[in-house]
Amino acid sequence: MERPPKKARIEPSSKKPTTTLSAKLEKQKKAAAAAKDAPKPILKGKGKEKEKAAPTPAADSTPKFTTAKPKPKARPKPLPQAFKIIAGSYEKLLYGIRGTLHASSAASGWEVHLRPVFIFPAHVSCIKAAAASPDGGKWLATGSTDEIVKVWDLRRKKEVGGLMHHTGSITYLLFPSKSHLLSASEDGTLCLFRSRDWAVLRALKGHKGPVNCVAVHPSGKVALSVGKDRTLRMWDLMRGCGSASTKLGKEGETVHWSTEGTLFAVQTQSTIDIYQTDMTLIHSFKHPSRIHNIKFTPRVSGTGELLLVAAEDKKVTIYSVSRDPDIPFRVVGEMIGHSNRVKAVQTITLALPSSSPRPSTTLVSTVSSDGKIHVYDLGDLPAAASESPSESPLEVAELAPIAEYDTKGTRLTCLSLAEDDGDDSATAEVGKKRKVDEEEEGSEEGEEWASEVEGEEEEEEEEEEEEEEEEEDE
């Protein structure tokens, strides 16, 4: 007899029943609705972890960056109390003069002391251009008729190397920022270098002749250049290409932006033309003598800008800048003291000692063919009077130099000013504490420059040795 088959024994399963797709979707909808009504969680952490934890915003929600806490504003950089004057010459000599501010019993409460730091032949021919990098003045670039741009480390007093990318004399050098150098040459090109490795980022071509001068807008995005082809060209530094050009009908010798970047000046011999950014000519005036250099600078007392004009008449003339076509540029001051043509003028803003009633001032430095370097205090210029279209003459103030250095006959050609710590030991300590960054690459190469004092001691020793040898021979 066959046994009847056993019935299958069904035990209750411990596993949860399988959820269908429709149930899953329904569950997700309920969860999404609940999450929408629930308060947003406070997120902790930073970076990618925070981004992962954050819910995806709706299409009409505010972007994340607008809800982020604003970054605290960077503290304004303190003004330096010392500076370096860099001057080139026809005699191939490069001068480095340190200027420091000291408290004194004078009416101003302070005075400037000038001391030579280095004097040496930097090129094999005439030095035509010099430029120091901003924000600390680490780099110095010099250009010559030898067609070479030489780069120097001002902190270590060493030569970094030579940039041999031009095939003509170097006519102008400019640091738009501490990370880039712009050069102009008689070969008709401008070169943009990167200070990290001194590589050429762009070679800007467009002029059909030597380039005389280049000026970068305060924003650092565009540059203007003038040359012997009688054109004014605008360059897009972001893209590294030319963006516009116009015929001036005359050779522009120098071009400079105002400090705010709303105006620019083109100088030709003794004429200065003032343009707005849309190329509208709003002023054109003649200086009594041939002009060699111009410089825009803000007033120390009051508001507004000034235009400094270095010329053949042995002085620097100070003009008040007017943005109104109906109000002309007027002479408000003169910087006197040179006995020959003034070749270049530059400015630097410094913090004054506590003994001074003013917290800061702007110093003006000039170089002349008489071989002298002068320093003036622009704060000595009286505050601006109310401007009006009246033709009544304004009182012209005369500013005498507050400090002077005599090179004893050297024909000075170019000038640049750089910030300085004011002390070699202080500079060394700061250098030790600085982080090694991209600017430090390549700064170990080259030889240390001989200072004037060292050079004089060596010459005296050589002369003494020669005298001793002559006495022995006798």
Image (tube, rainbow, N blue to C red):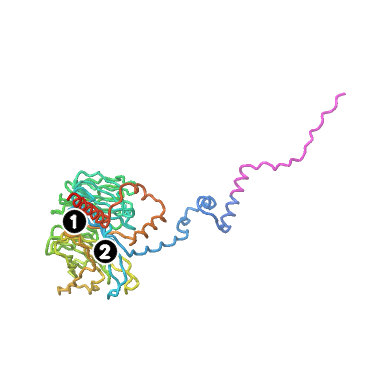
Q: How many marks?
A: 2
Which amino acid lies under the numbered mark 1 shown in the image of this protein? Thr
Point 32% across, 73% down: residue: 356
Q: Nearer the viewer, residue 241 or 8?
A: 241
- Label 1 crowd (10 A; few <14 / some 14-19 / many >=20): many
The answer to whether 206 is drawn above or below residue 252 in the figure is above
Which residue carries the number 1 mark?
413
Q: Is residue 27 left or right of residue 145?
A: right
Give the percent coordinates (x, y) of residue 350.
31, 65
Residue 459, quarter of the rendered image: bottom left
Point 34% across, 61% down: residue: 423
Q: Quadrant of the N terminus?
A: top right
Magenta: main secondary structure equals loop
The answer to whether 73 is drawn above or below residue 18 in the figure is below
Q: Secondary structure at mark 1?
A: strand
Q: Is residue 352 left or right of residue 296?
A: right
Read off the magenta span.
1-28
Give the percent coordinates (x, y) of residue 210.
17, 48
Which residue carries the number 2 mark?
114
Q: Secondary structure at mark 2?
A: strand
**Badges 1 and 2: C-beta atoms under 8 Å apart?**
no
